[in-house]
Image (cartoon, rainbow, N blue to C red):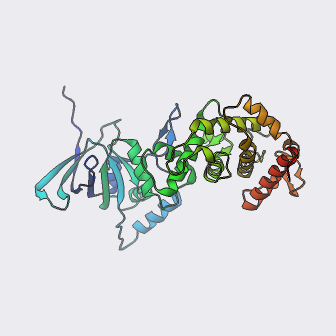
Amino acid sequence: MPRKRNPVLRKAALRVEQNGRHPLYLMSLTARELHAVADISRINRDDSGTLLGYQRGEVRRHVRDIVEYLDGDDVLFPNSIIISLTSRVRFEPGHGACGSDGASTGTICIPLPGDGEARPGWIVDGQQRALALMQSKRADWPVPVNAFIADEVSLQRDQFLRVNNTKPLPRGLICELLPEVSGPLPRKLAGRRLPSSLCDLLDRERSSPFRGLIRRTSQADRQAKSTVVADASLIMMLEESIGTPAGCLFPYHNISTGECDLDGIWSILVAYWSAVRESFPEAWGKPPSRSRLMHGTGIRAMGRLMDRVMAGFHPGERNLRKRIEQELRPVVPICRWTSGRWEELQLEWREIQNVPQHLRLLSNLLVRAYLRGRGGAA
């Protein structure tokens, strides 16, 4: 018996030639039609740790506000929704449709999925608006839609980051997406790509002392409960060490060309933070509420100490971790990560907070203790 063909959604569209491989279409869809052809691809990881999707989770309050507006009177909704469609989509040019300005009119033919089949599209921008439209009384109301053809998830992620570049995307979501984007990025995002990639390695590589401890946006709730270090804290520590001349990772990254000695950086990070883990076993791997070493200020302050300690080492040296442990010995007695009082700071251990003043005070204290132990000026 021949297989039943899936229905096809046919819509009038304007095709704009910007990129020969990825044509752009301008059209209108109702919320029901949009829901039929496009998924919201929320960020998550598969069992092997591979990143899937790229969207942030639903923001209920934002959606509710949009629904209230849509259900009101005299509504105007000019904001377009951007979707990515697979190459299964066809375009039928209209008669005499070709224009000299790179645009042509016609009909876009979008195959609708059968039972158990994936939809041919993904919402790249406008997730909250699409959800609100479906929940409003205007689910059959036409709204502007921009669509581009791309089978590659990497291109969809690239466009997602660019579209949301000036919007308040969660920092953790950006951190996870940046290593997956291979194309050129805006300057402020390009500077975060290497730290974000290193954070990804620290989370997954077996040799990493942080393996399984880093809290990521893509984690399920049950996984998040077993993680204790915010990825944003690690990335800020890495950004500071890579991006400032005083950082121990700065010499391993050529800012002008983007080239870096990843092996050298990795050796330094694994050796130093493994030595930190061995030096403070009672504080390692605990939630920040029980250990300020795993707290954002603790991670960043120990990162600034890393810049001092590792300035005297080469990543290829023998017994590197053991030698770093010896360097950290003068610092260990003054630390109050899990109990007691930081005497020089006049703060109880729980009072260390994620504020610039506490970061500065704690960093200076650790560096002074280290220099005193080496016989240097405090």
Numbered marks: total: 0
* Nearer to me, 336 or 198: 198
Which of these two is toward me, 206 or 146?
Answer: 206
Q: Please give the name of the residue rendered at 35% of the width and 48% of the height, measured from the top-left corner.
A: 38
Give coordinates of residue 88: x percent, y percent: 26, 41
* Residue 179: % across, % down: 50, 43
Choose between 69 and 250: the one closer to the eye. Answer: 250
In-image side of 67 versus 346 (left or right): left
Image check: 90 left or right of 343? Answer: left
Q: Nearer the viewer, residue 307 or 116?
A: 307
Name the residue at 43% across, 50% down. Answer: 184
| Residue at the far top in the pictured view | 1
| Residue 106 in which image quadrant | bottom left
The answer to whether residue 259 is seen in the rendering is yes
Looking at the image, which residue sits at the far bottom? 74
Estimate the x, y position of residue 157 in percent, counting from the top left. Answer: 43, 47
Quarter of the image where one finds residue 216 = top right
Residue 283: horizontal and vertical position, in percent? 79, 40
Quadrant assignment for the N terminus:
top left
**Residue 282 visible in the shown view:** no
* 51 displayed left or right of 294: left
